Amino acid sequence: MAHKPVNRIVLIMVDDDEDDCLMVEAALYEALLKCDFHCVQDGIAMMEYLNRSGQFHEPGAAPRPDIILLDLNLPRMNGREVLQQLKSDPEFRSIPVIVLTTSTEEEDIVFCYNAGANTYIVKKPSFEGLVWAIKIIKDFWLETATLPTNRGYPDQRKDPSKQTG
């Protein structure tokens, strides 16, 4: 089976809890998922990352993500808003978005799938549970599914008038 080498995967996590970012990074290591891992603290930073603006304007500072792990409860721009923006933008809608949150609310689950989330995972309360979830993500998204290649990711957005925020 021909697929993208695992060590070339770019994984972005959007979560304002630094401990959660560190736990996911450790779980990635434990699950033997070799990737280029980045964590941004809120929805505004995620959009700046994707648009290569603000703190991410330097060339190479923001490689296009292959997968986005998205928390829902974020400051400045919440995860629901980020999801809606990503899935309504033709440039970013093909990036798989995995909602990784503590919310078990049916309303959140339905909203996320209706907005285009590819998967909804409730954060497990233990490190072992997080490693299990990362292994599932690895097995499905990186070893079973075929992800789009992102070679055409431009250095700048084509039409700055489309940017929001």
Image (cartoon, helix red, strand yellow):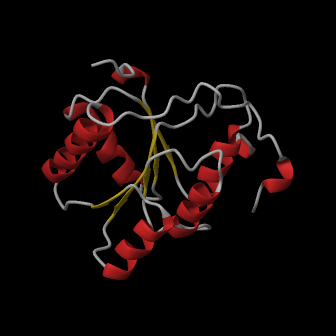
Quarter of the picture holding the C terminus: bottom right
- Residue at far left of view: 128
Using residue 6 as the reference point, say whether residue 114 is left or right of it. right
Which residue: 64% across, 44% down? 50
Which residue: 50% across, 67% down? 115
Counting the numbered discs, the total is 0
Which residue: 20% across, 34% down? 31
**Could you tell me residue 32's position as x and y percent?**
23, 28
Using residue 147 as the reference point, say whether residue 159 is left or right of it. right
Q: Name which quarter of the figure residue 63 lies in.
A: top right
Viewer-proximal residue among 4 and 101: 4
**Could you tell me residue 112's position as x and y percent?**
43, 68
Viewer-proximal residue among 38 and 154: 154
**Could you tell me residue 162's position as x and y percent?**
80, 55
Which residue: 35% across, 52% down? 19
Quarter of the picture holding the N terminus: top left
**Could you tell me residue 96's position as x and y percent?**
44, 47
Location of residue 114 with respect to 124 vertically, above or below: below
